[in-house]
C-alpha cells in the first residue's frame, strides 16, 4: 500500500523554506536546523538546481515568489560564468570566488539545469539569457569524461531536444548523445562483471543518475545496447537499495559501497531519492514496465516516512527537508540540497503523475 495520495503531495509543495535560505544575491548552501548559515556562502551547484525547481514550480503555479527567486538565481549563475563558458562554483558570503573553476560535476549539472529550465514557463527574457549562457558553454561539451558529469550532459541534451522555441542550430544532439553515451558504455564495460554490474569499483552518490542517463540515451537514439546496459545496471543497483517491501534504502555516505565490500547503510541522503525518482521515471518511459515507476514512487515515499526509521524528512508546512537519515534518526538540519531534492521529486510526481495508482 502506498502512503501518499497525489492531492496531499500537490498541496505540500511550498517554497517558504527555500525563500528563507535565499538572500538578495542567491541561495545559501547550509542551514543549522532551519536557520541559514551565512558563513558557508553560496554554490553554483545549489543555485542551478534552485533555478530549475522554482521554474518548475512557476510552471504549475505562476507565483510571483517563484518568478522572483528564478530571476535571482539566474542572475547569480550568469555572474559566476567565466568567459570560456565554464562556471565558478564556490562563492563566499562577501561575493569572492573561492575557486579558479568549479568541478566537472558543477559544470555539467549547471548545463542540465539551465537546459531543463528552458522547458518551463519562465518568462522569455529569462530564456534568452539562458540561451546566451548555453551558447558560451557548448564548445566545452566534450571536455568531460567522468561518469556523472557525462550523465548530466546527456540529461541536458534530452531537454534541449524538446525545445522548439529556443534552438541551437550548430548542435547535433543525436551525435552528441551518441558520443557521450559511448563514454558511459566504455566505463561500464571496463568495470562490470557478472557479480558487479556497475560503472565504477564503488557506488557513491547520485547512483541512479548513471543508468538513468542511458535510459535517456536509448529514448533519443533507439540503440538496444544502451537499453541493455541501462537495465542491467539499474536492476543491479536496485537489488542493493530496495528491500523486499520495496522500501528505499540508498547507499550511505559513511563508507559508500565498494566492490566486494558491504554497503554503508547511513547516512542516507535526499539527493539519492531524487535521482532514483528521476531515473525510475526515465526507465518507465523507456520500457513501459510498471515496476520502474513503482521504484520512483517508493523513492518519493522515502521523504514522507516510508524509510528504515519510519520518519518523515519532508515538512509540508514550509517545504523544508531534513539533511538525511543517520543511525540515530533524522539529521535535523534542513539545508538547500536536501530541500531542493525533495521539491524536485514532488514536482516531478506532479508533472508525470507518478503517484497515480494506474
Image (cartoon, rainbow, N blue to C red):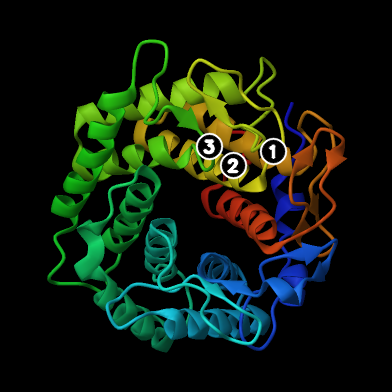
Total marks in image? 3
Q: Position of residue 115 (x, y in %)?
A: 37, 66
Compare marks 3 and 1 and give the one earlier in the sequence. 3
Compute the Cα span from label 2 to label 1: 8 Å
The answer to whether any part of residue 228 appears in the image is no
Callout 2: helix, strand or loop?
A: helix
Residue 204 in sight:
yes
Residue nearer the viewer, 80 or 286: 80
Point out residue 124 in the picture as x, y percentages from the top left corner: 40, 85
Mark linked to residue 159: none
Residue at left offset 67%, top offset 29%: 249
> Local crowd at mark 3 within 10 Å, few (<14), some, or many (≥20)?
some
Q: The C terminus appears in which quarter of the rendering?
A: top right
Point out residue 130 in the picture as x, y percentages from the top left corner: 37, 79
Look at mark 1 in the image and give the residue it sits on. 268
Q: Residue at x 54, y 41 (%)?
A: 205
> Between tags 3 and 1, which lies in front?
3
Residue shown at 39% from the left, 79% from the top:
81
Residue 11 quadrant: bottom right
Tell me if residue 7 comes above or below residue 229 in the rendering: below
The residue nearer to you, when weighing 40 against 266, is 40
In the image, residue 132 above or below residue 297: below
Residue pointed to by mark 3: 204
Left or right? Give the position of 308 relative to 226: right
Q: CA distance from mark 3 to mark 1?
A: 11 Å
Residue bearing the label numbered 2:
272
Pointers 3 and 2 in contact (C-beta within 8 Å)? no
Residue 216, quarter of the rendered image? top left
Q: Is residue 64 left or right of residue 99?
A: right
Amino acid at each position: 500500500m502506498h502512503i501518499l495520495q497525489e492531492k496531499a503531495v500537490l498541496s505540500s509543495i511550498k517554497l517558504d523554506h527555500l525563500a528563507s535560505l535565499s538572500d538578495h544575491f542567491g541561495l545559501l548552501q547550509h542551514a543549522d536546523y532551519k536557520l541559514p548559515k551565512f558563513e558557508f556562502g553560496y554554490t553554483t551547484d545549489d543555485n542551478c538546481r534552485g533555478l530549475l525547481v522554482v521554474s518548475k514550480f512557476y510552471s504549475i503555479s505562476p507565483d510571483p515568489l517563484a518568478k522572483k527567486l528564478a530571476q535571482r538565481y539566474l542572475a547569480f549563475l550568469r555572474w559566476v560564468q567565466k568567459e570560456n563558458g565554464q562556471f565558478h562554483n564556490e562563492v563566499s558570503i562577501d561575493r569572492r570566488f573561492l575557486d579558479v573553476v568549479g568541478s566537472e560535476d558543477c559544470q555539467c549539472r549547471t548545463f542540465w539545469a539551465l537546459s531543463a529550465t528552458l522547458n518551463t514557463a519562465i518568462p522569455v527574457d529569462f530564456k534568452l539569457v539562458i540561451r546566451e549562457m548555453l551558447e558560451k558553454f557548448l564548445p566545452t561539451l566534450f571536455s568531460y569524461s567522468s561518469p556523472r558529469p557525462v550523465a548530466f550532459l546527456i540529461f541536458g541534451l534530452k531537454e534541449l531536444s524538446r525545445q522548439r522555441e529556443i534552438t541551437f542550430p550548430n548542435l547535433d544532439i543525436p551525435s552528441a548523445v551518441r558520443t557521450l553515451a559511448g563514454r558511459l558504455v566504455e566505463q561500464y564495460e571496463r568495470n562490470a562483471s557478472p557479480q558487479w554490474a556497475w560503472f565504477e569499483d564503488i557506488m557513491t552518490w547520485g547512483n541512479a543518475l548513471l543508468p538513468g542517463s542511458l535510459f535517456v540515451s536509448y529514448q533519443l537514439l533507439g540503440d538496444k545496447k544502451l537499453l541493455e546496459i541501462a537495465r542491467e545496471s539499474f536492476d543491479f543497483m536496485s537489488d542493493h537499495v530496495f528491500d523486499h517491501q520495496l522500501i528505499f534504502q540508498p547507499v550511505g555516505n559513511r563508507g559508500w559501497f565498494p566492490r566486494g565490500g558491504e554497503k554503508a547503510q547511513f547516512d542516507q541522503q535526499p539527493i539519492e531519492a531524487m535521482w532514483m525518482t528521476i531515473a525510475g521515471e526515465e526507465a518507465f518511459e523507456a520500457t513501459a514496465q510498471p515496476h520502474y515507476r513503482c521504484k520512483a514512487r517508493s523513492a518519493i515515499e522515502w521523504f514522507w516516512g516510508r524509510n528504515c526509521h519510519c520518519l518523515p524528512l519532508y515538512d509540508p508546512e514550509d517545504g523544508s527537508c531534513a539533511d538525511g537519515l543517520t543511525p540515530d534518526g533524522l539529521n535535523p538540519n534542513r539545508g538547500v540540497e536536501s530541500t531542493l531534492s525533495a521539491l524536485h521529486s514532488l514536482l516531478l510526481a506532479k508533472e508525470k503523475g507518478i503517484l497515480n495508482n494506474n
